[in-house]
Image: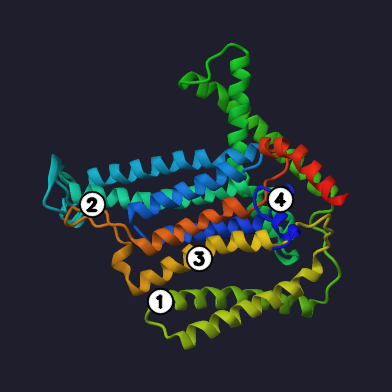
Amino acid sequence: MSRRTAHALGDGAIPRWLHPGAWWVWALGLATAASRTTSPIVLALIVAVAGWVVSRRRPDAPWSRSYSVFLRVGLVVIAIRVAFTVVLGAGIGAHVLVTLPEIPLPEWMAGVSIGGPVTAEELLLSVYLGLVLATMLACIGAANSLASPARLLASVPAALYEVGVAVVVAMTFAPQLVGDVARVRTARRLRGRSDRGVRAFVGSVMPVLEGALERAVDLAAAMDSRGYGRTGPVAPRVRRTGSALLLLGVVGTCVGVYALLDGGTPGSVALPLLVLGLAAGLLGMRLAGRRAIRTRYRPDPWALPEWLVSLSGVVPAVTLVVMSVLDPDVLVGQTAPLTWPGLPVIPVLAVAFAALAGVVAPRPPGTAAVRDVAPARRRELEEVAA
């Protein structure tokens, strides 16, 4: 490996922003893997790997604190799932933990029960299912903490620019909310007020809403001053053809992916549908992109670190999707009978491979570690140049 290639990877790399699309491919790959299993060991490992990568590669920015918020939301999801099981459970299982008073219901609500016996099997199953959703939320939180929303918007294809603006604005809601809450809590502490409890929460709502309104007005003014919404001259036939191809591409891709994941559909039908949908979608985006007048300033490169980060997220997704078809019992958290969860070796190794992203991705500019390493790196580069 040459010196230039070695400097392009890991902690010794020159600090730069990783392409946000690579972080989202990595995070969505982990979320896909989480959706295919209820094994608590695999799900806990996914959360741990995502947290480790975030701790190593998150930038020093307000939106980089989203991961912990999504973890808390995931815990709330698990608690709500368990509460619904306790109240509306069917009492499936042999190990009864407690018997709640049962409310009689009319005949037209047959099959629904409120109260009654609460079993350990049913409670454990609800925890596993809630953990799946909590893990997927943690993966989305990791992507929000690692990928810059502004750079993600700059990487959206011209044909999807309007949709991309709406999606990026929606994705920045949680990170900006976290930053606003932290700012208001800091201001309350500096004024000698408590930043915890119900009174602090009530007193923080109005400043947070005011900050959101100011950002919305500033965003609208910035978009208008930059000519957002202007379109270039395109023939009506080309515009209609591009829209039709885009629609055909989306439908073909969705049907192809569903057919590919469905075990009952032969591969000779699923794969051509997927390839045809992708080809139609790419051609439609190229034609539709002619009507969008955009300029790009220093676009983010897609180099070797981006490929490796994306690969580290795709590997666990593909592995668990294939195993869910070939050997689905390995990915199931057993609840009946009650047993300790087993250790699925192949899924664990596939998820552990996703930690590669924390090593090969370059450190973002502005972090404390980069500021400490930067003088030594500058001296090294000067020596190499000399």
Label 3, residues with CA under 10 Å away: few <14, some 14-19, many ≥20: some
- Residue type (three-letter) at the residue carrying disc 2: Trp
Residue 113 visible in the shown view: no
- Residue type (three-letter) at the residue carrying disc 1: Asp
**Residue at the image point whose x is 60% and y is 26% from the top:** 206
Instruction: Name the residue beneath numbered marker 1.
Output: 262
Marker disc for residue 340? 2
- Residue type (three-letter) at the residue carrying disc 3: Val
The Cα–Cα distance between marks 4 and 2, rounded to whole angstroms, is 43 Å
The answer to which of 209 and 50 lies nearer the viewer is 50
Label 4, residues with CA under 10 Å away: few <14, some 14-19, many ≥20: some
Instruction: Return the residue found at the far right.
Output: 386
Does 77 appear above or below 273?
A: above
Say whether disc 3 or disc 2 marks the residue closer to the N-terminus.
Answer: 3
The Cα–Cα distance between marks 1 and 4, rounded to whole angstroms, is 42 Å
Residue 327 image position (x, y, % from top left): 32, 71
> Mark 2 or 1, which is nearer the eye?
2
Does 103 appear above or below 154?
A: above
Instruction: Name the residue beneath numbered marker 4.
Output: 13
Circle 1 SS class: loop
Say whether disc 4 or disc 2 marks the residue closer to the N-terminus.
Answer: 4
Say whether disc 3 or disc 1 marks the residue closer to the N-terminus.
Answer: 1
